[in-house]
Image (spheres, helix red, strand yellow):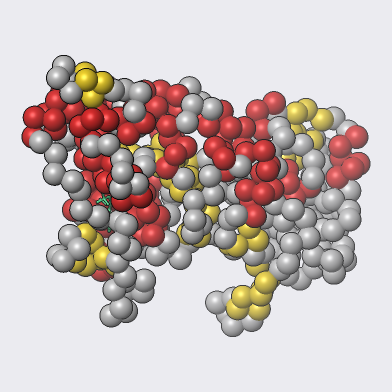
Amino acid sequence: MPKKFHNSTLHPLRKIWFIASIMISCIFITICSLILGIQPGVYRAMEIKGFQDSEFSTLDLSDDTKPGNNSLLRARHGRYLHTLVPREETIISHAALKFMADKHLNANFTPVSELQKSDHRTFVDELNLTGEKRGEKLSKYPSSSGSFKRYNVTRRLPYAIIIGVKKGGTRALLEYLRLHPKIKATGPEPHFFDDNYEKGLEWYRQQMPSSRRDQLTIEKTPSYFVTKEIPDKVYKMSKRTKLIVVLRDPVTRAISDYAQLADRRPDVKSFVELAFIDNRTKIVDTSWAIIKIGIYIKHLVNWLEYFPLKQIHFVSGENLIKDPAHELRLVQEFLGLEPMIDNSYFTFNSTKGFPCFRKQVNSSHIHCLNRDKGRSHPAIDPSVIKRLRDFYKPFNSRLYQITGQNFGWT
Ligand SMILES: Nc1ncnc2c1ncn2[C@@H]1O[C@H](COP(=O)(O)OS(=O)(=O)O)[C@@H](OP(=O)(O)O)[C@H]1O
């Protein structure tokens, strides 16, 4: 098996769509299709990956980039290979450089258009992904050595999405994740896949915050989880998208959702009137959205048609309040990040009844979510609560079974 290095530091060239790809018997460097403006596929010695398939999700194109004086690697073993070493700020992975040096290999250039003419095989599953546009502005950040290196700062389609659930604690989770230096998160919910889909992926990308190439972009729109058509749409954007769902006891969730509704529409009917088809028989009205959202397993099944379970991370909404650092550790792990958000960021605010947090670990300034998070709930008769708990029980059991996670709702 050839050993693969994913080179996330190569610097592609303007005009001439060069590829940075090295294949010398055991080294194979891949690069993202977007950079080249060509479909993912295998082009002789190089592999072009789809946008999200490649961590290299930036377009490092700048107007002043020109081919440098280095030249393409030409393999000695009958196979040719291509890479680019255009200018001094172009960095090839150390592994590749060392290998080249060890083998006394030279560099050279070959336009991608030429490579495309030669044998080409397309990966079917990564077609038509769009992502970042060419020619985005480059920003400068000081490197650790004190000199300036070019880092591509641009807006990127999300690497992970908090897809639900409404009133689960999604805002808290997003704000906590924002504390991680490798995470960039949206502010408002973009509602791309439900309300703005016709605007296209470029519109969606524009809703994202700018990020460096070593940062992950995350958005949250809790309505995604319960909308049937959305898994397909997310899959079409990228089947690699990581999905996060914050789940909270469906009965408390329903009451929380109702409390918000009643805040906005004081003339709304009582919870009991809406929750049951008939108050006397106490048949639960499953057509009421506030009830329907809580049948989590039903919605999850739609996602599982497109995404494997291991690509979906479930956060316990209750634990997120009780022990945010623990839940955050699991999420950071899931995202493949070094765990940096720990206990030292959180402090429990007993007046609010929720954790609040500091944005910098040493800061004395504490932030809490605003007043529409953690609002007081209307008092609901215990018999109503019991009836709803009984209603959700079989669905919850199935959820525990499928996810392998017991959320402990009774
Ligand atoms: N730190 C902190 N501060 C305040 N609130 C917190 C926090 N952590 C979790 N929660 C719970 O988040 C619930 C709101 O969930 P969402 O943010 O998903 O709501 S929304 O769907 O975006 O409207 C919100 O629901 P309510 O208590 O019913 O308001 C809270 O229970």
Whether residue 137 appears in this view of the structure is yes
* Residue most extreme to the bottom: 146
54 left or right of 123 in image: left
Specify the quadrant of the image occupied by residue 295: top left
The quadrant holding residue 88 is: bottom right
**Is 278 situated left or right of 246 in this image?**
left
Q: Which residue is drawn at 23% across and 37% down?
A: 270
Residue shown at 62%/39% (left/top)?
197
Determine the residue positioned at 49% across, 56% down. Answer: 188
Task: Give coordinates of residue 278: x percent, y percent.
Answer: 21, 20
Quarter in which the N terminus is drawn: top right
Would you place residue 188 above or below residue 306 in this image? below
Left or right of 284? Residue 210 is right
* Count of all numbered marks drawn on residues in the image: 0
Considering the image in quadrants, where does the C terminus appear? top left
Front residue (pair 134, 348): 348
Q: Quick one: 147 or 301, which is closer to the camera?
A: 301
Q: Does residue 381 appear to the left or right of 10 in the view shown? A: left
Q: Residue 106: x and y, percent?
A: 82, 57
* Residue at 63 percent of width and 51 percent of height: 205
**Residue placed furthest toward the front:** 267
Q: Would you place residue 237 above or below residue 172 in this image?
A: above
Q: Residue furthest left?
A: 382
| Residue 257 at least partly seen | no
From the top left corner, tell me how far across and down residue 98 is, in percent. Answer: 66, 59
Q: Position of residue 167 (x, y in %)?
A: 32, 45
